[in-house]
Amino acid sequence: MGRTIIKTIVSGLALALYSGAVSAEWEVNLTPGVTDISSSVFDLHMTIFWICVAIALVVFGVMFWSIFHHRKSRGAQAHHFHENTLVEVIWTVIPILILVAMAVPATATLVEMYDTDEAELDVQITGYQWKWRYDYLDQDLNFFSNLSTPREQISNEADKQEHYLLEVDRHLVLPVDTKIRFLLTSNDVIHSWWVPALAVKKDAIPGFINEAWAVINEPGIYRGQCAELCGKDHGFMPVVVEAVSKDEFQQWLAQAQAEKQAEAAAAERTWTLDELMQQGEQVYVRACAACHLPNGEGVPGAFPALKGSPIAMGDVAAHIDIVLNGKSGTAMQAFRDQLSATELAAVITYERNAWGNSLGEAVSPAQIARLLEPSTGEAEQ
Amino acid sequence: MSDKPTFWQTLMSVLASFLGVQSERNRQRDFRTGRPLHYILTGLLMAALFVIVVILLVRWALSLAGA
């Protein structure tokens, strides 16, 4: 029995060491990160860690020495006494002094962390169940960032890739050497936007706007996750920050804005049923399948089935309405701001023609685009 | 009458309670001859003073940071 336990522990340790050697990214310690703040957070962490080590050495050293030196076999006799005020004062005052000494550098870092003044770029970050929306406030650009790990990897039908559950369809692209202010809020429940390399972990709370900031020193890809339990797919809404040079950022910005306009133009042309079905399936997998499932059967009692549903099989206006505006009191979100007119038309068409829902009719992107217009005007006023 | 705790002794007992450590001798003295009201009033006063000191400390730290 004892031998089995030792064997298990030894093989477990060997495995831990081995996997550490295999994966270069496997780290036990906090990351020093890529901002000045993250490196001062790292330094604080190491300072406090070594203080803890010193305390442990002293306390356990004295304890072990006392136990060993006063062991029974050497005839040690317990000394009976009730209290010693001097010793008690010493062991109360020393921790107070240590805590105050740690609070001084920690306060300096915290004050710096909260100083969002003079930011050169404002990015609003909105948490949704279960994705992030990024608004470049002065650049007239916004988009959603969805998990891009294929469903097959999640359900163990395919091998998991390197960035399993830490990859998204659209990165949050940011320039280096620029003070970027993040304004965090949420559309539904409390989320938390966390990127360890930037030392930013801030709650996104509906109805509140929290602030954080970063000046990224090195270009690169920095991954993070939602750090506040927010429901079923809490572990499936990663953050991917891509830091690029200032020039590259301007190029990216121009391209992203051009793409947005091209997409609006594409909605005006005529789409065939096949084209819509094809794109609809992609949109469905990305935006709908988390709840309604890839096979359209939903989760009984929680998320209704679309296969054979009265809405997907019934009046098209009612179907468009629920997809665009959601259904209050349920998990069904309003997708009018999340998807483009083409994507909305495609996914509605897909839902009406997939899994045996064979209505054979297409919803045109132009039709959806007209429905989106008046309300976007209102929303901006 | 003569072994009643002085104001200084009352104050030291209250501060000892803030720290959480008191000698048995002082405790016996306080409970034998002290009046509860004296300790309560001194305690409230010291608590208010503590809060004021914390507020001033925070203000001072923020002013150092230029906030």
Image (cartoon, coloured by chain):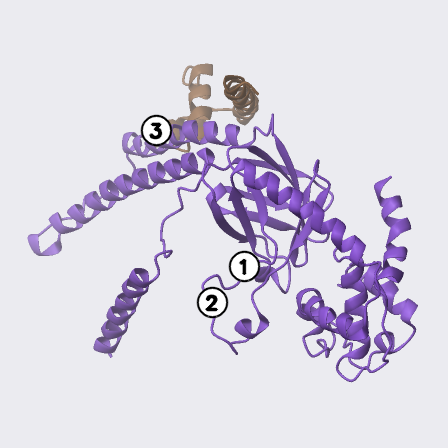
Chain colours: A purple, B brown
Classify residue A357 as left or right of residue A96. Answer: right
- Chain ID for label 3? B
Total numbered badges shown on the rendered structure = 3
Q: Residue at x 55, y 37 (%)?
A: A247
Q: Which mark is residue A161?
A: 2
Q: Residue at x 64, y 61 (%)?
A: A231
Q: Amino acid at mark 1?
A: Glu
Mark 3: which secondary structure?
helix
Classify residue A267 as left or right of residue A1. Answer: right
Mark 2: which secondary structure?
loop
Q: Split into 4 quadrants, where in the image is the N terminus of chain A?
A: bottom left
Q: Residues within 10 Å of mark 3 (few under 14, many from 20)?
A: few
- Chain ID for label 1? A
Residue A191 image offset from top left, x and y in percent: 63, 51
First-in-chain label (2 vs 1) = 2
Q: Amino acid at mark 3?
A: Arg
Using the rendered image of the protein, determine whether residue A30 is visible from the camera's viewpoint: yes
Contact between marks 1 and 3 (CB within 8 A): the answer is: no
Q: Residue at x 83, y 83 (%)?
A: A358
The residue wearing badge 1 is: A167
